[in-house]
Image (cartoon, rainbow, N blue to C red):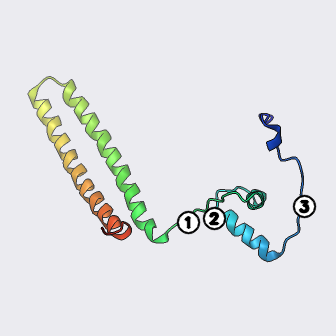
Amino acid sequence: MARKPIANKEELLVHLVTVRISDATLKRLENLLAESSCRSIGEVARKLLNRERINCFYRDASMSGPMEELALIRKELKSIGININQQTRYFNAVKSTVEKSFHFDRTMALCLKFDAKMERLFSIISRLAERWLPRS
C-alpha cells in the first residue's frame, strides 16, 4: 500500500546530504536518539540542523516502585468497581427482601474493601506530595 501524498510539496525530504562524523559525535547522536521521541539518527540530525526542539524523556528510577504500586491499586479498584456494579444490578433485579439483604451485604463487603484500597492510595499520594510538591 502506497503512502498518502503530502499536500505541501516543499516539505518533502528529497535532497540527500551525506556527512561523515566522528565516533564521539555518533555516540552523542545515539544518546539523543535514545532519550528523545525521534525514531532515527537522521531525524535527530535534521532537528539539530533546523534548530528545532528535541523533546527528551527521562525516567526517575526512584519512582518506579510507587508507580507500580499505584498501577496495581488502580487495577484492583477497577475490578472492585465492576463487582459493585454487578452486585447493584443483582440487587435491583431481585424482588424478595431476603435476596436484597444478601446482595446488600455482599455490596457492603466490597465497599469496605474499596475503602481500604482508597486509604492505601491516599497514603501513597500524600508521600509523593511531600516529596515532589514544594512546601508553601
What whole-number distance in Å separates the C-alpha atoms at marks 3 and 1?
A: 31 Å
Q: Are marks 2 and 1 in contact (CB under 8 Å)?
A: yes
Task: List the residue tagged with mark 2.
Answer: 35
Amino acid type at circle 3 is Thr
Q: Quadrant of residue 34?
A: bottom right
Left or right: where does residue 38 sit relative to residue 123? Answer: right
Q: Position of residue 130 (x, y in %)?
A: 32, 69
Q: Residues within 10 Å of mark 1 (few under 14, many from 20)?
A: few
Measuring 73% from the left and 72% from the top, which residue is drawn there? 28
Left or right: where does residue 2 sit relative to residue 65? Answer: right
Mark earlier in primary sequence (3, 1): 3
Q: Residues within 10 Å of mark 3 (few under 14, many from 20)?
A: few
Measuring 11% from the left and 34% from the top, which residue is drawn there? 101
Mark earlier in primary sequence (2, 1): 2
Between 101 and 42, the one lying in front of the other is: 42
Amino acid type at circle 1 is Tyr
Q: Quadrant of residue 100?
A: top left
Measuring 88% from the left and 69% from the top, which residue is drawn there? 20
Q: Are marks 3 and 2 in contact (CB under 8 Å)?
A: no
Left or right: where does residue 32 sit relative to residue 108? Answer: right
Q: Position of residue 66 (x, y in %)?
A: 39, 65
Q: Which mark is residue 18?
A: 3
* Secondary element type, mark 3: loop
Between 28 and 77, the one lying in front of the other is: 28
* Secondary element type, mark 1: loop
Residue at the farthest left position? 97
What whole-number distance in Å separates the C-alpha atoms at marks 3 and 2?
A: 24 Å
